Image: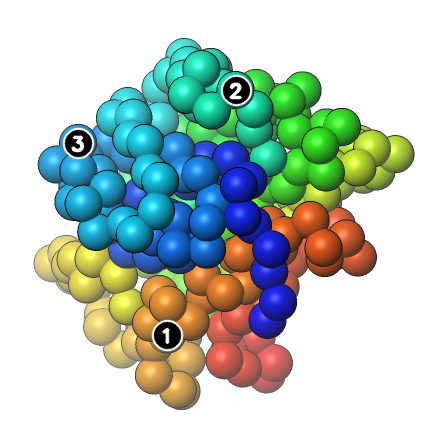
Amino acid sequence: MQSNVKDRAVIVTGAASGLGRASALAFADAGARVFAVDLNEDGLAETRDLAKGEVATFATDLSDAANCQPVIDKAISQFGYLDGLCNIAGILKVMPLAKITPETWDLIFAVNVRAPLFLSQAAIPHLTGRGGTIVNIASATAFAGYAYLAGYTCSKAAIVQMTRSLAMEFIKTDLRINAIAPGGVNTPMTKSIEFAEGMERELFMRSMGVRPTAEVEQLTDIILYLSSPDNTIFHGTCLNTDDGFTAG
């Protein structure tokens, strides 16, 4: 996939590990200027040390909407301009309905939906007029039912609709807003799944894909592709990268 992101200033959230880290490193390796954001300061330092290119870091808690505007302000202060926002930070909670609390539900939506929305709100004035891009991370679970994942699946379905709605709102500008919807991905977040007492593993596993989970590096080419100014035909789309999960 051909991408040209050299010298483009890009914010990558969730950059301390997993897909966020892999994306930050891929952008830096391709010559982009990366502003890496995460709650985990030590993980961000490791990402910066692993990078072959320019990576600046900013540790903050995106579950607090008040921290979204400062992310954009710090990135502009660092680079002087902004070309891309990749909303990759996410949270996954596996639990039966009876165990879901208002606090848990609100946390899932705060990280997975509210943060991308308010980061986008703050970034868009800087992205328009520059052929800027936003890439959101949805999930194959947005399109199918999953036992014990009500909060997560609802949040990812919301990301799909947010992507589409904002794409329509800014369709007369040069801004492009897209999402990808991976299936299973081999990340620390998915490896940390724990089953609470009373949960039936069979109910959860019946919704898993047949093929092996993807490695994060298989998705970074697509994220860079959607972030490239050369690929202007993509706007308001959600690319299913789920290895056939939603096909049947």
Labelled disc at residue 214: 1
The residues tagged by marks 3 and 2 sit, at their Cα atoms, a distance apart of 23 Å
Relative to 167, does residue 231 appear above or below in the rendering?
below
Labelled disc at residue 80: 2
**Which quadrant holds residue 149?**
bottom left
Mark 3, residue position: 41
Query: Amino acid type of disc 2?
Result: Gly
Query: Amino acid type of disc 3?
Result: Glu
Residue 13 on image: x %, y % = 38, 38
Q: Is residue 213 in view from this perspective?
A: yes
Q: Earlier in the sequence, mark 1 or mark 2?
A: 2
Circle 1 crowding by C-alpha within 10 Å: few under 14, some 14–19, many from 20 = some
Q: Earlier in the sequence, mark 1 or mark 3?
A: 3
Residue 226 on image: x %, y % = 62, 55
**Which quadrant holds residue 209?**
bottom left
- Residue at 39% of width from left, 49% of height from top? 28
Query: Amino acid type of disc 1?
Result: Ala
Classify residue 239 as left or right of residue 113. right
Q: Is residue 185 in view from this perspective?
A: no
Q: Earlier in the sequence, mark 3 or mark 2?
A: 3
Residue 233 on image: x %, y % = 79, 57
Relative to 64, does residue 244 appear above or below in the rendering?
below
Circle 3 crowding by C-alpha within 10 Å: few under 14, some 14–19, many from 20 = some
Q: Residue furthest bottom?
A: 210
Relative to 7, does residue 74 appear above or below in the rendering?
above
